[in-house]
Image: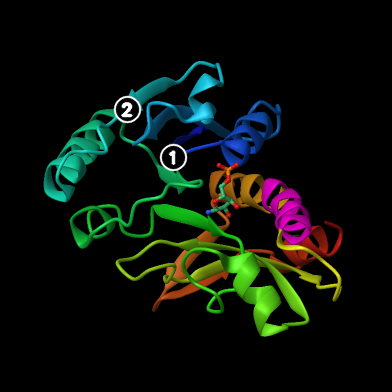
Amino acid sequence: MGKLKVVVLISGRGSNLKAIINKCSKKNVLAKVIGIISNNSNASGLKLTGDFKKIIIDNKLSKKRFETELQNNLEKLKPDLICLAGFMKILSPFITKKWKNKIINVHPSLLPSFKGLNTHERALKAGVKKSGCTIHFVDESLDGGPIIAQVETSINKKMSSKELSEKILKMEHKIYPEVVSLFAKKRICVKEDKVIIKDEKKLNFFIKNI
Ligand code: GRF
């Protein structure tokens, strides 16, 4: 069986990208990162090395031209899965419709709560008792799209947003690569806008032990 071809879109640090690359290096994971695309030539994630293409698309281009270039590159790479990992651009239906159910994202909150930016600050301000991270399919809505997996953590009253973000980032680094691996095992599909995971109990067990 061929490996699942993964393209990762980043804008910055790339710690989730690194976690995905590490997971793909494991013998039992039938996925490989074939390309990294960034809208930021200074993204530190671009420093990661491996057998993949690195593509930078000029962030100053108009949305239409940016996405045309993105689409041209994706057509060449022909990924089975596109992972957004700290990619700070909202994709329009031009991309999301063409790659429907093939783009996933990690968001540092329990969606649908706290969509958008500054999630941890807003979660703390709201006084929620729990937060976490979500892996979801990407559609044209902001941080919308069918939810694949969520990991939660309790919030300690004295926590700073930095502490909360560090705690949740560690969870992201486990769950995101795990979801990529589930795609490689063909255990994830979407029916009527709901995600169905084959053998979901195993995933729940994995999540409980994060
Ligand atoms: C992560 O917290 C992710 O949830 C959010 O952006 C951050 C990206 O971090 N979408 P990194 O670039 O993967 O280190």
Give the residue displayed 66% in from the left and 79% down from the top: 125
Secondary structure, magenta segment, majority class: helix
Q: Quadrant of residue 38?
A: top left
Give the camera-side residue of 89 and 138. 89
Write the start and end of the magenta stretch as one range: 162-173
Give the residue displayed 39% in from the left and 61% down from the top: 138
Q: Secondary structure at mark 1?
A: loop
Q: Quadrant of residue 177?
A: top right
| Location of residue 156 in the rendering, given as x and y in whole percent from the top left corner | 86, 72
Confirm if mark 1 falls within 8 A of ligand 1.
yes
Residue 29 seen anywhere in this rendered image of the structure: yes
Dot 2: within a 10 Å radius of its alpha carbon, few (fewer than 14), some, or many (20 or more) residues? some
**Kind of residue sitting beneath label 1:** Ser
Is 199 placed above or below 186 here? Answer: below
Give the residue displayed 24% in from the left and 53% down from the top: 95
Instruction: Check if residue 167 falls in the magenta segment.
Output: yes
Dot 1: within a 10 Å radius of its alpha carbon, few (fewer than 14), some, or many (20 or more) residues? many
Q: Pointer 2: what residue?
A: 56
Instruction: Check if residue 3 falls in the magenta segment.
Output: no
| Location of residue 206 in the rendering, given as x and y in whole percent from the top left corner | 80, 58
Q: Colour scheme in the image? A: rainbow
Q: Secondary structure at mark 2?
A: strand
Q: CA distance from mark 1 to mark 2?
A: 10 Å
Q: Is residue 79 left or right of residue 45?
A: left
| Location of residue 122 in the rendering, given as x and y in whole percent from the top left corner | 60, 74
Give the camera-side residue of 34 and 113. 113
**Kind of residue sitting beneath label 2:** Ile
Residue 109 seen anywhere in this rendered image of the structure: no
Question: Which label's residue is closer to the chain start, 1 or 2?
Answer: 1
Is 53 placed above or below 147 here? Answer: above
Labelled disc at residue 11: 1
| Location of residue 108 in the rendering, given as x and y in whole percent from the top left corner | 61, 61
